Amino acid sequence: MAPGTTYEQNLEGQRLLDENEQLRTALESSLDENMRITEDRDRLLRRVSMLARELQTANSAYARVQETVVAPPTDTDTEEQELRRSQTDEELRVAFEELQVLTEELEVANTSLHQVNAELETRVAERTRDLMDVNAALRRSEARLSTLIEGMPQLLWRAVDGGQWTWASPQWQDYTGQTDEQSRDIGWLDAFHPDDRDAARAAWDSAAAEGGFDFEGRICHAGEHRYRHFRTRASPVYGADGTIVEWLGTSTDVDDLIRLQQQQTVLVAELQHRTRNLMAVVQAVTLRTIKESRSLDDFRRGISDRLEALARVQGLLSRRDLGTRVSFDALLRDELSAHLDVDPLGNAPQVSTEGPIGVPLQSALVQTLALALHELATNAVKYGALASKAGHLAIRWQVLQRGEQSRLLMDWRETGVTDVPAPDAAPRGGGYGRELIERALPYQLGARTSYAFTTDGIHCTVEVDIPSDRTIKETADG
Amino acid sequence: MVDQDLHGHRILVVEDEYLIADDLRTALEMAGAEVLGPVPSVADAEELIASDPAIDAALLDVNVRGEQIFAVADRLIELGVPFVFATGYDQASIPDRYSDRPRLEKPIKSRQIVSILHPLLQMT
């Protein structure tokens, strides 16, 4: 019987078989009865023919006596012979009557036997039709079941106690490359990752006691030659006496799910790391601002500007979709627009920008570069090119190819600044921007930088690695 | 305050965030220590250890430039140099084999650095 044939279908089939058996028994007893009547008739026929022979013998003896005896027979002889003949005659007549009765009886019996036979044939034909219908229904049901079994994405199998497989679905065979025969008994274990096999056996050891089998392990994909994670579960099938007859099992591919979970764990850890790092940076920036400030007012302005710059860059980092990067032009535009009105291209009356859009930045660079640009822009507004109408700020950038590595080269040039400090003068604004550019960027990112006062303003360059197309996937930043 | 607690000791600092590294250096120098580095990567740390093995203790950021610091930690264990992990991660991200190693959670206070390094240096 195919797996999954319903209990009701089994019952119906059994009932039809029982009825056929009953019909067969009835037919056999009718045949027995017929046989018995036939034997009776034959017996009677034998007796009739015997009597007939006797009568003929008697008749011919009588004729011979009349022919051979010319003399008229004596009355005594004739009377004796006459008596014997009439006795035999009588006996024969009785036997003929009996035969007549039996023959009639036999005819009646035969007629009823014919009827019974005809009836039986009709009923057998009906039952055969019923059986065919039930069988057809079973076959349809089996076809539906096997469509279901072969169509579902899970790998199915059957096993008996201790995990000895008795059957594996075509999906299992397709996925693992094992034949049904190879997977039998504990052959299926070979498809599992060697490191997971002991755990699989252990899960079977406790399956009967727990009333279920539940195990997560890697199964080798024959086509791709790699292991994928599967959740493998089985439920026991109980017999009428409450013992486990067999186990029906499924193996479900959960590889994508597990990969996503792992990705999520990495992202959460990354977020933790960034948050704590950001707090450490805030702490450092605060300490630095305290050192530079001459008054509480000074501190309030300085810390507020710098925290806003940090907040802006966090906004840029969090707005980007997973896997896309913050571009240099977006970062620059964001920072400039915090200080002055710029058009969508990043230009303002005293500011010109020029360079390719969409140049991607490593996210480790974004925060420090944003702080550096913030310090440069703040100083330009306070003391440099943007402090008077005569000044001009030009920012240009390009991408250079250094062997395999792409690098961003940024050039920040202020002109028309009359109030340039002497080369050995203490830096205005505490020199934080200069420190970020000259020390922080090279330290963190291996950038090559320069920072100089020319005769009419500051000239600063930053050259730093940018991710190439091949390194789309970002790693955790320190 | 015990400003001179680390006097005469050479402390390696591995930290890739410049601003944090600079703060750590300042705090250690104020406590009288000589700072080796700071260095921003596993490769730089390994190079420094190879060229100057006279290290009394180390302060290690767990994750530098996307790399985990554990190769450096294992090298220091071989050399018998005590170290402290500085971490932005939860404890679970540090392997069990380092469970007996002290760790500092970011952001780090300078007072904490001295109080955690001082007993390590007394043992060597």
Image (cartoon, coloured by chain):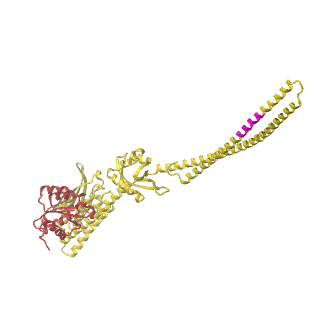
Chain colours: A yellow, B red
- Answer above or below: position of A341 versus A148: below
Image quarter where the C terminus of chain A lies is bottom left
Q: Is residue B77 above or below residue A42?
A: below
Residue A62 x/y as whole percent: 84, 29
Depth check: A328 or A466 in front?
A466
Which of these two is toward me, A265 or A236? A236
Figure disc tally: 0
Which range of residues does the magenta coloring cover?
A: A39-51
Q: Is residue A43 magenta?
A: yes
Residue nearer the viewer, A423 or A374: A374
Q: Main secondary structure of the magenta part?
A: helix
Q: Is residue A434 visible?
A: no
> Residue A433's quadrant in the figure?
bottom left
In the image: residue A445, left or right of residue A258: left
- Rendered residue at 47%/56% (across/down): A238
Q: Given the current orientation, which residue lies at the most extreme left position?
A: B8
**Residue found at the very far bottom of the displayed protein:** A296
In this orientation, does residue A279 appear? yes
Which of B55 and A230 lies nearest the eye of the viewer?
Answer: A230
Q: Position of residue A57 (x, y in %)?
A: 79, 30
Horizontal and vertical percent position of residue A268 = 31, 62
Residue A407: image location, x then y, percent: 24, 53
Q: Can residue A471 be found in the magenta stretch?
A: no
| Residue at 52% over, 50% down | A144
Q: Quadrant of residue A292?
A: bottom left
